[in-house]
Amino acid sequence: MGLGPAQVPACMNAVESCFPSSISLLCLWHANKAVLRYCQPTFVHHKQGSEAYQQGLSDWNDFFNHWHSIMRSSDEQAFDQRVQELEKRYLPQYLEEVGYIKSNWLDPYKKKLVKAWVDQHTHFGNVVTSRVEGIHGLLKSHLKKSTLDLFEAWRAMKHALLNQLSELRSNQVRQQMRIPIELSGSLYSAIRGWISHEALRKVEEQRKRLMKEDLPSCIGTFSRSHGLPCAHILKALQEQGQTLRLEHFHPHWHLSRHGVHQVLLEPRHRSNRIAADSTTSKSQSSTQREPSAFEAVQAAAQPKARPTCSRCHKLGHKMTSKACPQRYEGILYLSSSSAQVEAMPVALSPALSGEARPAAAVSASVSSLQEGEPLEAPSSGLSGHAGSGRDDTSCIVVSIETAASSAVSSAKPSTQGGTSPVASSSTASVAPTLRYDDPQAIYRRYVATRDAWYKAQPRGSVKTNQQYRRALGLPLRYDKASYQWCLDWKQMGKLCTTPTGSRDWSKEEMMAYLDWCKAEDDRVEAQVAAEMESNPFSSRRGMRDIWEAAENDGKEQQELYSA
């Protein structure tokens, strides 16, 4: 039985009432894991440093080995002696742990766990429930999910059982026809093809004891628990020159069994009335089991890596921790950004689709946009975009240059010309300047261009992002693969880093980045086509020339968008 100490009494009572003539044992593996779950956290601590952690782990291994030695006690005298050794070494420092072992396992269930009492019954070496859980896992692998109807569930289970039965029969036939070399002695001549190889190998281990050590007095433990002849029986057979017979083996080990098997009765099932009456609970379709308590303890006992601050890049704390020296730098950055100049020149530069165009042809200023003057479109015109719906048309990109070291001071009347002077502040903090190809800079230009288009529209017209993209001939949507491409570390990256932390990219930001990438590709292709037309042999260059040309183009674009 693989149960914890809380469920053992109820299950023991049910077994005694349903199967009164049977002998029930407890799964030793589950008992070991229950002791690990309760006792290990006391020995192992992560917060005391690596050396203390290793020392605690060593102490825990010694404690756990004492528990295993108690479970392996061959007789009652050895059991009492090892329990006394455990108490002598770990009391009173580990009083709760020793008390848990004695009160929950040794005192009530020692006859169902300790080898001295377990080997008094015939269990054929099965003291754990791993075989039952193995076939349980096999059935779940065929079921796939837990929401099948009765017919589908039985059909899946039938396939699993038939496969197991076929494999068992083929294995029995194979063992009847073939004999391992190590089991070909005269001692096994009368039982070849009648007894399983597993039983013969266990008997061979007993025979090898005759050659290595002096046998102690026979207490009949091995024969009683496994149903096999022990070393003392083998010694007597060898001295008399006799062979093993079928009578020496329990029918459990026979390859061919005769007689009618007794049918096992199904235990009575108790339905869960709370779950049956519930109307809000959803049925779980997964067949994966929930993690056990000892697995949670083992996962917590593993040493974890120290966190790295994403702001100051130091080990031992996070960016929101009080230990970070730069914790409130984002507040200073926001306060300095709000004091910067808002009315700055804006340069409108077209993203070329077929040929390069000068930036001066589409320059404007924020003042003209704020006064409500209509924005003059390029030669293609906005009306052409709205009607044609082509993707290769040019679009307007606005580049805003932020002032890094200037702030708006209090406006005072001037004696000369009556204008309000703008004084530069030397104490304002310098904001980082984004590259022209930075995703945040690209999105700012996209928003500025869209706002300019909004102001150029008649009053009362529909002004949405979809209308703006439809008017400029931009795609109204992109496929999922394009958005995944944007999140690659070579493009936008998974997260957007801001002065206040990190966040996910919005779909609008990714669409603006895709628009810019397409326009940039069209510009480069047009530039290469013009270069090939004027000088066809320009492609015969080395890698150095190509990288220098790319570097110069990047500088030109940076100056163009910063102008």
Image (spheres, grey):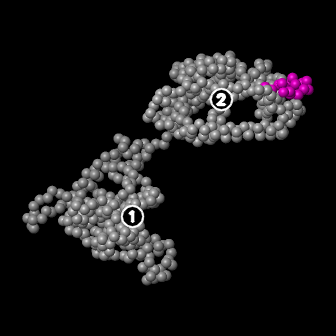
| Quarter where residue 120 is shown | top right
Q: Residue at x 36, y 49 (%)?
A: 501
Position of residue 465 measured from the top left corner of the image (x, y, whole percent) = 32, 60
**Would residue 386 be counted in the magenta stretch?**
no
Residue at image mark 2: 128
Query: In the rendered image of this protein, does residue 135 appear above or below residue 117?
Result: below
Type of amino acid at the residue the image marks with label 2: Val
- Frontmost of labels 2 and 1 is 1
Give the quadrant of the C terminus: bottom left
Residue at image mark 1: 475
**Numbered range of the magenta stretch:** 234-250
Type of amino acid at the residue the image marks with label 1: Pro
- Does the rendering let one see residue 558? no
- Which of 11 and 161 lies nearest the eye of the viewer? 161
Rendered image: mark on residue 390? none
Residue at mark 2 to residue at mark 1: CA–CA distance: 64 Å
